[in-house]
Image (cartoon, grey):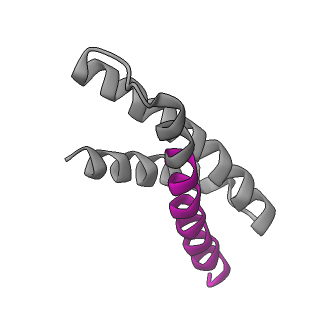
Amino acid sequence: MPIIIFFIVIIALNFAFSKKVKSLTSAVYISAIVSVLTSICFQVLAYIFMGYLDPFLPIAFVIQIVIAFVIGFVINMFILKLKGDK
């Protein structure tokens, strides 16, 4: 269940910032911003759910940023392609 919430947060934040995607460079910047925001949001949600911070917070945070960046970049490339087809 937590992984589904993680993916939902990634997708929702990328679509929230979709109006800002205008080029490949902006897609990279937005993916980086969204990946950090997603990781922070997910760790806060985990803290609220568990009642304590993850003992492996630094490792989890880095891995979440990398995974969220890759997924966000793919979503932003899809958005960029849809904008180019119009």
Q: Residue at x 51, y 56 (%)?
A: 67
Observer-nearest of 18 and 36? 36
- In the shown orientation, is residue 31 left or right of residue 28? left
Magenta stretch bounds: 64-86
Q: Residue at x 52, y 48 (%)?
A: 63
Find residue 78 and report its horizontal and vertical position in percent: 55, 74
Find residue 33 and report its horizontal and vertical position in percent: 65, 43
Residue 54: image quadrant is: top left
Observer-nearest of 67 and 78? 67
Q: Residue at x 76, y 68 (%)?
A: 24
Residue 9 visible in image: yes
Q: Quarter of the image containing the C terminus? A: bottom right
Residue 23 visible in image: no
Q: Which is the main secondary structure of the residues drawn in magenta?
A: helix
The correct choice, above or below, for 6 with respect to 70 in the image is: above
Q: Residue at x 72, y 58 (%)?
A: 28
- In the shown orientation, is residue 47 left or right of residue 38? left
Observer-nearest of 63 and 69? 63
Residue 46: image quadrant is: top left
Find residue 35 and report its horizontal and vertical position in percent: 57, 46
- In the shown orientation, is residue 23 left or right of residue 73? right
Residue extending farthest right: 25
- Is 42 covered by the magenta stretch? no
Residue extending farthest bottom: 85
Residue extending farthest left: 1
Number of numbered discs on residues: 0
- Is 66 covered by the magenta stretch? yes
The correct choice, above or below, for 25 with respect to 46 in the image is: below
Find residue 10 and report its horizontal and vertical position in percent: 45, 50
Observer-nearest of 7 and 54? 54
- In the shown orientation, is residue 19 left or right of residue 13? right
